[in-house]
Image: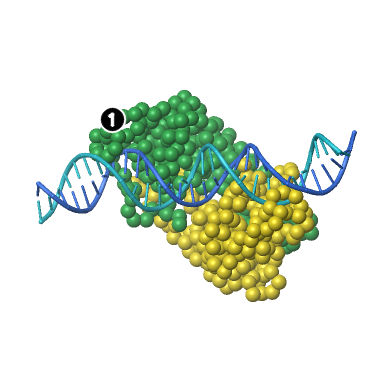
Chain colours: A yellow, B green, C cyan, D blue
DNA sequence: CCTTCGTTAGTCAAAGTTGACTACCCGCCC
DNA sequence: GGGCGGGTAGTCAACTTTGACTAACGAAGG
């Protein structure tokens, strides 16, 4: 699973109706071009693809008011909303090591109910533990570790990473159960998009924190 | 940077001369089809592409001795070896969060001298710390954290991950400085490929530890 | 006025990735 | 002896990703 569809669906959904450039701007505002594959080509491609698949509805719109080529506005469909929620759930639950998917999942988790989010995160921990024991049982050879040479360091890395993530996830669960943040159905949601005309404080310039090169 | 080129170059190099299927088998032996994008299509594509770019030399060979279509054998060129070492260095040094690249880097680090490996890993820690402070300084707003709502959890995740990785990297550095493993120029290298006819103990079957779904 | 620069909005070719598919040969079982 | 299961070796079309490029307009300066 790549993060691009989730990010684009999430951005369009928060706007209600958005054209590609707006989505692109939101993702830049979120720093997503730094920590995910949210580059112009990918964004426009995802929009077109998802429109073709019925997840988005495309409105052909007259030339832009502010220069540039005519633009297409997109709205999320019911099917798209369903897919969006499915992707958020999957990204929260499944133990994989992709930062971009994890980050997007956290950004969008508040679109789910609080109790469900907690349940999904617990399932995530369960899966990471399952995976952890599969690594330790399967790859540590009968003749004892050391047999593997430096290759054993790879398993070591995986186990270390899995542990660190489980620990962090547990902390997040605790904070959520402690009442932090505002989840679906709990009142005014947190809005993280730029409204028309608002300027982006994180606009391209000097180094960003997401600058992972 | 994707891991496929590094993995394929590394596999061909360890063999001296290998055809696609052999590379494919080695990568399966390493479990790479589970934790990286080392699928048949990607492997053959990478081989052809790198042959076209002069990193590998392709020998057209008569039909296989053991059934199947004729096969092409590849040998790494000087340019390919240079690129391989460059990729190993980059993968060891650069702080990014891709497990597949990290794992491959560790698997191949012993092709570099011990001292260089340690230096590169120290640089890696330095970069991850630099990145960590960029995150904390830049994204924690002046009005204090909490301003960000649940979005702050993303930064929290990044910082937590960076710390865990730095800790693990430091442990690895200590072990290497303590004399563990056999590095370039230190005698008989560790060999991790299957010789012709040897069977793969990790052949496809029940779950592998790399099964990250 | 007219050129140049930045912003808006998006396209495109080339490269990489995926997963299913082909084709060949060997051994084995009935 | 024929057919079928499994291993060998690789191809292919569809899709995604990348990074550079285009084109239109407004503002600003000379």
Looking at the rendered image, the quarter that the N terminus of chain B falls into is: top right
Residue drawn 72% across the image and 49% down it: A68
Where residue C7 sits: x, y (%)?
A: 76, 48
Where residue A12 sits: x, y (%)?
A: 64, 61
Closer to the camera in the image, D14 or A40:
D14
One can see residue A184 in this view = yes
Image label count: 1
Q: Is residue A23 above or below residue B45?
A: below
Residue drawn 43% across the image and 39% down it: B45
Crowding at mark 1 (Cα within 10 Å: few <14, some 14-19, many 20+): few
Where residue B169 sits: x, y (%)?
A: 55, 44
Closer to the camera in the image, B185 or A131:
A131
Left or right of C2 on screen, residue A28: left
Left or right of B71 on screen, residue B120: right
Closer to the camera in the image, A164 or B92:
B92
Residue with the most extreme top position? B78
Closer to the camera in the image, B155 or D24:
D24
Looking at the rendered image, the quarter that the C terminus of chain B falls into is: bottom left
Residue B10, quarter of the rendered image: top left
Where residue B146 sits: x, y (%)?
A: 73, 62
**Mark 1 = which residue?**
B62
Q: Is residue A15 above or below residue B111?
A: below
Q: Helix, strand or loop at disc 1?
A: strand
């Amino acid at each position: 699973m790549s993060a691009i569809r989730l990010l684009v669906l999430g951005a369009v959904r928060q706007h209600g109706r958005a054209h590609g450039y707006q989505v692109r701007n939101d993702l830049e505002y979120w720093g997503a071009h730094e920590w995910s594959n949210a580059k112009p080509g990918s964004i426009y491609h995802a929009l077109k693809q998802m429109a073709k698949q019925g997840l988005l509805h495309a409105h052909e719109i007259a030339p832009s008011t502010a220069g540039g080529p005519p633009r297409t506005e997109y709205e999320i469909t019911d099917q798209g909303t369903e897919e969006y929620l499915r992707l958020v759930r999957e990204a929260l639950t499944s133990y994989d090591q992709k930062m971009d998917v994890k980050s997007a999942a956290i950004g969008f988790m508040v679109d789910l109910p609080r109790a469900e989010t907690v349940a999904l995160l617990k399932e995530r921990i369960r899966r990471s533990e399952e995976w952890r024991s599969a690594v330790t049982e399967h790859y540590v050879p009968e003749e004892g570790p050391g047999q593997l040479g430096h290759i054993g360091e790879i398993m070591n890395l995986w186990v270390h990473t899995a542990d660190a993530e489980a620990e962090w996830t547990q902390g997040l669960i605790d904070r959520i159960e402690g009442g932090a943040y505002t989840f679906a159905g709990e009142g005014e949601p947190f809005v993280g998009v730029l409204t028309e005309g608002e300027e982006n404080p994180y606009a391209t310039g000097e180094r960003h924190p997401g600058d992972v090169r």
